[in-house]
Amino acid sequence: MKKTITVHLKERKYDILVSQSTNDFFSVIKKQIKTKSLFIITDTNIAKLHLKYLINLFKRQNYDVKTAAISAGEEGKSIKNLSYLYDKALEKGIDRKSCAIAFGGGVIGDTAGFFAATYMRGIDFIQIPTTLLAMADSSVGGKTAINITKSKNIAGAFYQPKLVWINTNFLNSLPERQLRNGLAEIIKYAFIFDSKFYKYLANLLENEIISSKDFDYMICKSCSYKTKVVEKDEKETNGLRAVINFGHTYAHALETATHYKKFLHGEAVAIGMLFSAKLSLKLKLCKQETYNKVKKLLNLAAFNLDEKNNPKQFLSLMKKDKKSVDGNINFVLIKDIGKTINKQVSDNIVLNVLRSK
């Protein structure tokens, strides 16, 4: 399969190339990137699985390839690792005309993207995602960030890649838990944009068989939805882009409270989406039927949704979320499958729903 989705922004555009063909990739990259100096940033897990393959791929095309690997997992998104990348890049002769390659999952995309945005005041970078979550969501849209001790994604920048290459062959090495992790973000797009996509996913998960064509379709569908939002609200200034944060306010609090060790991001988002649906039901924004549909699809995807919380701690953490304003927590809430609304919710109501979990 080959499909190209173009992201049109005010000052420029770039392509999301969905293809397993390296010829397709190089025909595009040669138009977008003029340098032969590449700095591949990956994590220790991907380095063992795929780094040699990618290095050889570029070297056969006469690229000068340098690499750096940071620790795998959410803990990789740290100031310490970012500093390590700056030092490694200087040591290896990476200059402002070089191009960084983010080769891995969402953690690598975020960290390598922030590195590219800030190294020598900005160098080009390309996203080559290797996980379902990164392919369907985080590699697109230009959000880059690292975590600090008390909150997630607080230090970051909007910085768009020159190209995103999605090669679904990389999914073959993913364990089931990582596939499910990415499925959460795909399900998110059904909840916020498309009741037909919801029905497609429900039928797919009920049959318990997902083919490579299904993965291609789900990824392209998700990327298309995100592209439309990013084009209208690239830097989240008019509120439109906020809708794709459905479930994320609670999810980020959950990840922070558990020190990024208990949950993968998608697992936390699944719990967060159910919390947002419950909050929507409490506020009478949606009917019981809608809440039930949200819970049904998350259950079909086999997410563990019974996570306990400390209500006061979670309220405090959500207030520190970067989407909160003047101490008021902004939530993306659901009215029906395919229809959402952004709304500030009072502390009392949030606490009430937190205590009812």
Image (tube, rainbow, N blue to C red):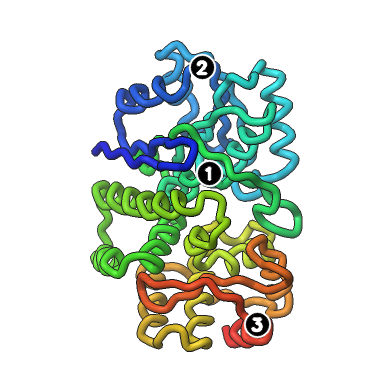
Residue 291 spot, x, y in % from top left: 41, 81
Report the residue at 40% width, 87% height from top: 288
| Whether residue 144 is visible | yes
Quadrant in which the N terminus is drawn: top left
Q: CA distance from mark 1 to mark 3?
A: 31 Å
259 shown above or below 50? below
Quadrant in which the C terminus is drawn: bottom right
Q: What label does residue 35 carry, if any?
A: 2
Q: Are marks 1 and 3 in contact (CB under 8 Å)?
A: no
Q: What label does residue 346 carry, if any?
A: 3
Q: Nearer the viewer, residue 203 or 317?
A: 317
Residue 109 spot, x, y in % from top left: 54, 41
Residue type at mark 2 is Thr
Q: Nearer the viewer, residue 225 or 166?
A: 225
Residue 185 spot, x, y in % from top left: 44, 58
Relative side of 269 to 150, left or right: left
Residue type at mark 3 is Ser
Residue type at mark 1 is Gly
Residue 22 spot, x, y in % from top left: 33, 26
Give the quadrant of residue 302: bottom left
Report the residue at 49% width, 61% height from top: 240
Q: What label does residue 142 carry, if any?
A: 1
Q: CA distance from mark 2 to mark 3?
A: 52 Å
Relative side of 231 to 330, left or right: left
